Amino acid sequence: MTASDAPLIAVNARDPEETRVALARDGRLLDLRWTRSERGSQVGGIFLGVVSRIEEGLDAAFVDLGLGRAGFLHVGQVHPGFADPALDAAAVAALAAPREAGVRSLLGAEEDADPEAAAAEAPAGAGEPAPEAAAAPRALRIGELLRPGRRVLVQVLRDAVRQKGATLTTFVSLAGHRLVYMPSLGRPGASRRLADSEERERLRQALLELGGPGCGLIARTAAEGCTAEQLGAEWSAMQVRWQELAGRARHAAAPGALLTDEAPVVRAVRELLGAEFGRIVVDDAAAAAALREALSAAGVTAPVELYDNSRPLFEALDLERDWQSLFRPRVPLAGGASIVIHETEALTAIDVNSGPTGQATLEETALASNLASVEEIARQVRLRDLGGIVVVDFIDMKRAEHRRQVEAALRQALLRDRARLKTSHLGSFGLMAFTRRRVGGGIPRTVETLCRGCGGSGHVAHHHAGALRALRRLRAEPQARSFRIRAQPGTCAILRGSFQEALAALGQPVEILEDVQVAASDPVVLPDLLAGPPSGR
């Protein structure tokens, strides 16, 4: 692969209100990280928290982090060492968790502080009791591990969303460019995303020599091909960071932050920077300098170019069109086919629509359209950072081998995603579901606000329905009063038109005022003396 063919990383940090970091090739977004200044992410941050409440019914604790909203700590993310009340928070974090607890929490948990820490490969037999071992011990309940007022060292796995506080874990980790250090893991490992099994084993042996058998080091995909000297330099820096963190945890006041993650630009580039990339283009001098310093400290040689043209970076690289398309539900595909993405409260539905493929039969047309959609489905899921349950409604196919072909194609396309996914099978109804854990907060939820007109449904109620609602409210009021109605212009037109006789029959003076800020289905009806001035006509 030549440098011109390799993906580049574009860093749009010129605008203080918004930072965008994109992995792209030939003007097409491949992956994306996005943050706003007023909503800085706490993911990866390590806090000394105080347990504020125990919820036995949820088997979870709420932890005060000093952020104004308590974080959520499920029992599955609580280190078993907290069962000993004599151990302080730092001592527990440094303990290697028992295999029956550690493997599930660190390698197979629903949430993890670092995507590649979750993808670490456990040695054969890990998590399985020895043949002579007795039955697995009873899982401890949250009340047996924690009490209100207990100090805990926690890491943020997911930012607070709407009414939910941040999701926390006591299995803390320090992420570097090539390595992740998890003291509770208690053994070295390598990311499953490293395709070469011999390379994974080489890296495990290198980490074993560096830190010993009880060292919880994990080799990331960026460690592929690295020498022992390169890994050792990063491990030395991690040891210093961990000792400083443990020292602050023993003496700091709680609650409060002990370690905040890197600047958003540095973290995003670290996550997106892989073995294949051509260059890093940054449109802000300060961000470029911070990146060069961070990459140099990690021993990474990566060309960082400063873009100083007045034209916006994403427009110059022809990426703005792809960015804007993320806010539209319909995504066109080649040949006239398309996919439609709709997020609901419970799940995200993706519908595949066919186009003129030139195939001879309906079955062949369905197969061609479905296969053409899988790459774009996987790409949109990554770029939009969709989370939770995702259900794809493929075009129905009668033949089982065609369904298996499409299912395998989607699974292969999803392998490029850095987030944790679990896929189901493609059934006879054309539905295939998978679950995905968000990397960030998700673009639609962060950028968009709830539409007052449609309430988030995507459909605005007819103005006729709003006029009827206003009429019903007037009929329910005492007769000897005058009223003022503020409503959408279309609703006002109906009230003055086809509903004019109905209003006159009420015998009440009614003033109708146009207000575009009022929802079409919910006009404001107030007694005249209490009605304020209209906000628009």
Image (tube, helix red, strand yellow):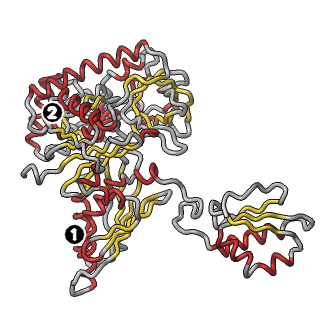
Corner quadrant of residue 176: top left
Residues at marks 1 and 2 touching, judged by CB atoms closer than 8 Å: no
Q: Is residue 101 above or below residue 27?
A: above
Q: Which one is in front, 238 or 147?
A: 238
* Residue closest to the eye, 43 or 500: 500
**Residue 174 location in percent, x, y?**
29, 29
- Say which amino acid is labelled 2: Val
Task: Find residue 523 and report its horizontal and vertical position in percent.
Answer: 70, 64
Q: Residue at x 28, y 52 (%)?
A: 314
**C-alpha gap between disc 1 and disc 2:** 40 Å
Residue 405, numbered label: 1
Q: Residue 432 in the image: state x and y as whole percent.
A: 34, 65
Q: Nearer the viewer, mark 1 or mark 2?
A: 2
Residue 212, picture quadrant: top left
- Answer few, some or many: residues within 10 Å of disc 2's Cα (few below 14, many 20 plus, some between 14 and 19): some
Residue 487 vertical position relative to residue 202 in the rendered view, above or below: below
x, y percent for residue 70 = 53, 33
Task: Look at 40% across and 51% down and name the residue there.
Answer: 443
Which residue occupies the extreme right position in the image?
Answer: 480
Q: Which mark is residue 300?
A: 2
Picture quadrant where residue 94 is located: top left
Extreme residue in the bottom direction = 360
